[in-house]
């Protein structure tokens, strides 16, 4: 049994993602606007709307920064857990894992992600959005 679990865990690939931006012309303001974008490889395995949920955090950079700081605090203190979300998902984190729940489906569990992966994703996304907002 232990050998099977070890080989199964060995085959789990870590989350991969990259950041880019999108430009579009806003016809109301008649200006060119630029938005940060995230692309999470094989994001469907984390839930149908997971990538959208993380993407939407960029709409409120202060909230994204608060989440990043709370995850950091979770590592450094005795705090047991935190939760966050934007529209469709609630993400509950402890020091070991992040559980992704679809709140539009009665809090259906969509995925369980190692804490380190969600921590790095949010930290990197926060840093990218912060830098992006300084530039644009």
Image (spheres, rainbow, N blue to C red):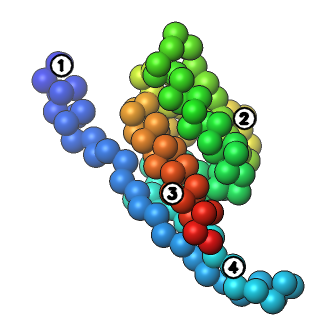
In terms of sequence position, does the residue under pointer 3 or pointer 2 come before the other?
Answer: 2
Q: CA distance from mark 2 to mark 4?
A: 36 Å
Residues marked 4 and 3 touching at CB (< 8 Å): no
- Can you tell which of label 3 and label 2 is closer to the viewer? 3
Disc 4 target residue = 33
Which residue corresponds to mark 3? 128
Q: Secondary structure at mark 1?
A: loop
Give the alpha-carbon distance from disc 1 to disc 3, as whole Å.
42 Å
**Residue named by callout 1:** 1
Nearer to us in this view, 11 or 38: 38
Q: CA distance from mark 1 to mark 4?
A: 54 Å
Residue at figure coordinates x 48%, y 69% from the top left: 20
**Is mark 2 in CB contact (under 8 Å) with mark 4?**
no
Q: Which mark is residue 115?
A: none
**Marks 1/2: CA distance?**
34 Å
Q: Is residue 22 above or below residue 41?
A: below
Q: Secondary structure at mark 2?
A: loop
36 left or right, relative to 88: left
State if disc 2 and disc 1 touch (CB < 8 Å).
no
């Amino acid at each position: 049994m232990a050998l099977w679990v070890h080989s199964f865990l060995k085959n789990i690939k870590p989350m991969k993602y990259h950041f880019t931006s999108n430009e579009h012309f806003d016809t109301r303001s008649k200006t060119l606007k630029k938005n940060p974008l995230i692309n999470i490889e094989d994001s469907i395995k984390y839930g149908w709307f997971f990538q959208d949920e993380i993407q939407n955090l960029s709409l409120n950079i202060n909230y994204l920064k608060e989440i990043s700081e709370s995850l950091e605090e979770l590592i450094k203190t005795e705090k047991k857990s935190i939760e966050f979300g934007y529209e469709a998902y609630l993400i509950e984190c402890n020091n070991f894992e992040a559980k992704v729940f679809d709140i539009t489906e009665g809090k259906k569990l969509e995925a369980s992600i190692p804490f380190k992966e969600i921590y790095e994703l949010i930290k990197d996304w926060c840093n990218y959005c912060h830098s992006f907002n300084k530039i644009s």
